[in-house]
Image (cartoon, rainbow, N blue to C red):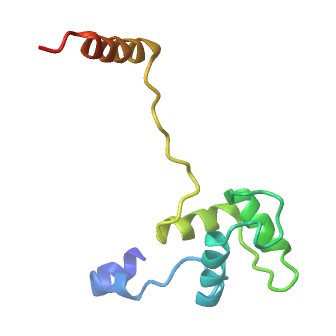
Amino acid sequence: MIRKSNKIGLACLARWTGGRPRLLGREDDEFVVQTAITWPTVLGKPFTRWSIRKLADHLNGNITRPVLICRETSRCLLAHRGISFQRTKTRKETGMRQAQAARHIICHTSSPVG
């Protein structure tokens, strides 16, 4: 690589085709995405939400159309498509804030109307 870059300059980077070839095609990608956005109960699974592990196990063991995919590849593919299985977290108010809010409501409702 160094000899080639010394010989032709930065043009050697455009010719580089390193890396492992993809094992999944576009049709497989679409099948993975469609499976991920489908409820597991529709596909006969006994749970209500997919996890990356459950999705990969389902795709690898699918009899009609097996897709050999690991968890990391499926996570990267779904993240690239904007799909995440993380639930949104909500914050609960502390007991002190709830008590203050309740006192505030009681004070305003029990004050004499002028």
On the picture, is 20 further left or further right than 58? left
Residue 53 position in % (x across, y down): 73, 57
In this rendering, position of residue 92 left or right of residue 76 = left
In the image, residue 47 above or below residue 35? above
Q: Which of 112/75 is in front?
A: 112
Residue 45 seen anywhere in this rendered image of the structure: yes
Q: Residue furthest right?
A: 63
User: Residue farthest to the front?
Assistant: 114
Q: How many marks?
A: 0
- Determine whether 114 is above or below 62 in the image: above
Please state the horizontal and vertical placement of residue 51, each as a whole percent of the image.
Answer: 68, 56
Foreground of the two, 13 or 41: 41
Q: Quadrant of residue 4?
A: bottom left
Question: Where residue 92 appears, x then y in whole percent?
Answer: 47, 28
The residue that appears at 49% across and 84% down in the rendered structure is: 17
The image quadrant of residue 5 is bottom left
The residue shown at (64%, 70%) is 36
* Residue 78 image-quadrant placement: bottom right
Residue 21 appears in the figure:
no
Q: Is residue 39 above or below residue 30?
A: above
Q: List x then y, in percent, for residue 110.
A: 28, 11
What's the residue at 54%, 59% (across, down)?
84
Residues 8 and 64: in front is 64
**Quadrant of the image containing the N terminus:** bottom left
